[in-house]
Image: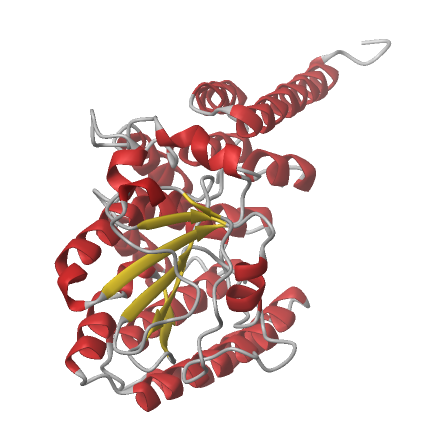
Amino acid sequence: MKRFRLLPQAWTRRALLGAASAMLLAGSSAAQAEPTLTVGSKAPSLDIEHYIHEELGKFDPVTDFKEGNVYVVEFWATWCGPCIQSMPHLVELQEKYRDQGVQIVSISDEDLETVEGILDRDYPGKEGVTFKELTSAYTLTVDPDGSSTDDYMRAAQQNGIPAAFLVGKTGLIEWIGHPMRLDDPLEQVLEGTWDREAYKEEMARQQRLEEAMQKINRLAGQGKMDDAIKAIEKVMEEFEGLEDEASVSILEQLEQIKYSLRLDSGDLSDDVVNYFREQLKASKGDPQAIARFSYGLMSSIQQGSDVGALADETIAALKEETESAEAQLQPLMYVLQAQMNASLGRFDEAISAQQKAVEKSEGRQKERMEEGLADLKELADQEKGEEDDTDAPEEGE
């Protein structure tokens, strides 16, 4: 039986800080009050400070929304890996629907210097194409005072980026979601076939889900795993039989949480282990999916769960996928390798992986990776000291 170590929480938080992208950490929090902006609301006017490509003259700055036109108001940041990954898709949509009165307005609330700092860099995976050249297809903007973020993101209680708001021909919010899922709603809004009320019900179901997940998290945090599993099975009943893409995806996520709870409760039955093995197998060739899986498994280990052979299998999958991952994702994948090896007492392998995380990072993220490396070396020295004390002969022997 492998011995899993509960690594100090301070180190695991520090090691992941900055490397864990929105892809992994942008969870939903239960709403504390009703959102003031939702589907069907009038879209707030925009008061944006900087238009990056204004000199190109492709689009006019947007304040109010012209009747008959369709707009996508999208929020992003330079540090957000999924935001960067969404850029080519936004380009594709803008080019496809440019002649149909569609304008994509992408807003960062960072300072202008930060955004301008990436514009001359090559876009990852597109050698010879800079961020500036790529994003010139749509309206890239910077709004440092955060007014647009307040009016949209906070008013709608959207906690993760990238996030897009689809403004229809009458100036109402038709859809809110991840820009990679924008295709069908945008096409249907343009065609006049979009069912806003059905989507509102979908969002209401999502809110009920969030509230239920708060209860489930509370039960799990209290160690009441059986009650938490029963609660999640009750939630799953609401989504069973629904065939829309969002509901199917939610049901899959709920099933994964259910099996994670079983794992956290000490269940290493064939049913549980085979479920996770199938998840790992299905993620092959998708570094982002491997990272999500690994992050979840590492969380279970940090809760004190013995995950058995799944740890070694996950480390092997991470190693296989890391070099082919997007540059922004690689530091996280190396950190996960470091954490999992450390949890198994393999500090040499853990330090090697953390060193690679340092090498693959820049700026503040690099500093955090270096701090994590120093912490890890200290843990390794402590472990060695404990082993030396154990091996030393007692006085009088």
In front: 348, or 49? 49
Query: Farthest right residue?
Result: 396
- Residue 76 in percent (x, y) is at 43, 50
Position above or below: 64 against 322: below
Name the residue at the top extreme.
396
| Whole-percent x, y for residue 72 in the image | 33, 64
Q: Give the residue displayed 51% in from the left and 67% down from the top.
A: 152
Q: Is residue 226 visible in this depiction of the protein? A: no
Q: In which quadrant of the rendered view does residue 11 lie?
A: top right
- Display coloring: secondary structure
**Left or right of residue 163, residue 180 in this image:** left
Instruction: Classify residue 190 as left or right of residue 222.
Output: left
Vertical order, 360 against 311 (above or below): above
Can residue 14 be seen from the camera position used here?
A: yes
> Foreground residue, 124 or 250?
124
Please provide percent x and percent y for residue 116: 44, 33
Residue under the image location 71 percent in, 17 percent down? 385
Depth order, front residue of 44/11? 44
